[in-house]
Amino acid sequence: MRDSPIDLVELIYRIGWFVSLWERRPDFPGYTFDPKDLIACLQVNRTWRRTLTPLLWTVYDSSAQASSILAHVQSTHLRELTLFSVRQQESVGLIKRNPSITNLTIGITNHTAKLLGEALESLPKLRVLSLNGGEDLCNSWITELLGNVSGLEELELKDFEELRPCRNPLQQPFLSVTKLLFSSPWPMNPGFAQLFRFCPQLESLVFESSRNVFSNFPAEEISGNLRECCSKFKSLQCLVKGELVYSLLDEDDICYMFQSTQCLVNFDMPIRDLTPKFCQTLVDAHAAHLETVRIHLRRQSSDRFLMANKILASCPQLTVFELVAGSQIYYPEDILGLFEQPWRCTNLRELKLTGFQTHGHVLERRVAFLLQTNVQNERVKKDLWNSMKMGADWLETQEEDLDLFLDDTDTTTPWTWVYAKHPDPDPTLYESLASRGWTNSMDYTPAEMDKRTSRLNKIVHQLVFEQLSDSPRIQKVTLEHDTFSRTHLRIV
């Protein structure tokens, strides 16, 4: 009797490798250990359970699994190991039994550093290491701990306190890490800045935006150390938890960081505002190399779109550009600064722009509703007027001006300046986009998209896609709440 394909061990094992043990976290960039899909596979039959059980134990996370079972874990298949609040002796024993570990997260103190160092030397495949909760440590502990881990690529220092610089830095071994992640406040760890001197292969620097993380940030010292010791450095990033930004680098500190390398390829950080100084420093130093620029704005000046235009017009290697801004009231003509000069980013693949939805724009939709339904209710008109006065300083204070505002031909509203330059958006815009392979995230037909989109947004959409006509690799465009994508590219 021939075996069923569903019971072929080789096939089952191969399938198991593609079953994810992780779920994406909705509140933060990253994943949470959740092997429910693989556990479901174990319940198919005995063959599946026997074959796939070793894969289940390629990951152990004490924060997601009961730490009381650690003493019974005899697996030698672990690839990813996370240990919190676990006795050091048990941790070391488990690490030594699993020489194939590639990702390790573990706590460290000055009392356990030496024991942990011996365990790490038994992990020739270790690539990613996260050290948590170090107190009263010196950089020499870090370098001695990791100096013999030759394949380590990524190092995270989380919740550290009082990490001190070395007294004899020239006697410390070099680390092989290419990526450093800091999830600890800088004021409490004066040794962080010196740590860069021991990482000659460093390419990427990542911060987590937590409380006070950038307070007293030694930007000038860090920039000097990176420039002197890390010739391969090319990526600067700050992880943001959703829309919550606790701490921001000052403009001068960011400009210092721009000077830390001659070839910045990736910039992804929240900043207070997109100012001329920030933009000019970035473009002057790195326009020829930048490939990814993601900017999250806390404040919004009237010329932020003009500064964004300068980046798009100056960086020919750009593949991803994001300008994410919160909703604030401003004059809609600001958005036209985005098109001041032709964009030169022919390699662009993804574009995201938010922050051009104005208070007046919201009112425009309300007015359109009133006009379409011919509402004459005085209470509704009064409520509309009050909301307009609260958020739009361009309005007069006389209530009789409301009737002028409700008139289609009125020329006193702030978006009429935009309309004067672009009076008639193309009525076939969305049909044209559809014919070129573009679809919207809500699966609206071109007619539905045309009906639901305000006049101001239509103008912005038209101008953006006109600029992107010379970007044949573009795949995804997000404009405020509208996302367009395509899979069939026109490569020239």
Image (spheres, rainbow, N blue to C red):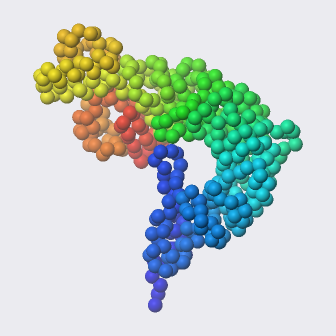
**Horizontal and vertical percent position of residue 34:** 50, 60
On the question of residue 235 being in view, the answer is no
Q: Relative to 478, is 149 above or below?
A: below
- Quadrant assignment, res 284: top right
> Which of the pair 483/339 is nearer the observer?
483
In the image: residue 248, left or right of residue 485? right
Residue 102 percent coordinates (x, y): 66, 58
Q: Residue at x 52, y 34 (%)?
A: 245
Q: Is residue 187 visible?
A: yes
Relative depth, front residue between 390 and 252: 390
**Residue that appears at 59% across and 62% down:** 67
Q: Position of residue 247 (x, y in %)?
A: 57, 31
On screen, residue 190 versus residue 340, left or right, reads: right
**Closer-to-camera residue (442/299):** 299
Percent from the top left, x then y, of residue 105? 64, 54
Relative to 128, residue 207 above or below: above
Kindly identify the residue that appears in the image at 47 percent across and 84 percent down: 3
Q: Nearer the viewer, residue 269 or 34?
A: 34
- Quick check: 103 above or below 270? below
Residue 483: quarter of image: top left
Residue 445 image-quadrant placement = top left
Residue farthest bottom in this picture = 1
Q: Residue at x 57, y 29 (%)?
A: 248
In the rendered image, the vertical position of residue 137 relative to residue 115, given as above or below: above
In the image, is 487 to the left or to the right of 422?
right
